Image (cartoon, helix red, strand yellow):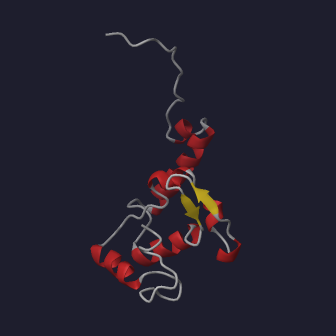
Amino acid sequence: MIYGGIYEEGSPLSDKDGYRTDVMEAVKKLGVSILRYPGGNFSSGYDWKDGIGPKDRRPVRPELAWNDLETNRFGTDEFCATASASAPSLTSASTAASARWTTLAIGWSTQRSAPHLLGRPAPQRTAARPLTR
């Protein structure tokens, strides 16, 4: 949970940047090595570009998965800062492996380059056939 969890601007439990100091301390003590953001249903409508730059200039958008408004007060910039402060890395992989994973993820969005990035042939389409018992 972001708002009211790890991030709560104006709370007496938060630092000057809005991070809950009690939650951040608990995350450190737990030895968290992977942070995921965005996650779950929220990720289906999230655009990372909405969460960068000055907070006062970020768009407020409908958050359809939870029938709420996403203020983008916590976004990409804050996630990267949180990950740096609370975990050794965003993933458990090495920097090189993380870079390849990112390249692969971008490649999949083009639906052409990803198999090549793995050194595999592109998947072949097969004719659809009905399932039989």
Q: Horizontal placement of 15 versus 52: left or right?
A: left
- Residue name at image x 29 percent, y 78 percent: 29
Q: Residue 102 or 31: which is nearer the viewer?
A: 31
- Give the tally of numbered discs: 0
Picture residue at 47% right of the left edge, 88% below the top: 15
Q: Reply above or below: 110 against 101.
A: above
Q: On the picture, is 82 further left or further right than 24?
A: right
Whole-percent x, y for residue 47 in the image: 61, 57
Q: In which quarter of the image is residue 71?
A: bottom right
Judge whether 50 appears above or below 64 on screen: below
Q: Is residue 41 above or below residue 12?
A: above
| Front in this rendered view, residue 18 or 53 | 18
**Among all residues in the image, which is located at the extreme left?**
30
Q: Which residue lies furthest to the front in this view?
A: 67
Q: Is residue 32 above or below residue 16?
A: above
Residue name at image x 46 percent, y 71 percent: 83
Between 100 and 4, the one nearer to me in the picture: 4
Residue at 30% from the left image edge and 73% from the top image edge: 31
Instruction: Locate the C terminus and report the quarter of the image it occupies.
Output: top left
In the rendered image, which quarter contains the N terminus? bottom left
Relative image position of residue 8 (x, y in whole percent): 48, 78
Q: Where is residue 101 in the image (x, y as percent from the top left)?
A: 49, 51
Q: Residue 129, image x and y in percent? A: 46, 12
Q: In which quarter of the image is residue 14?
A: bottom left
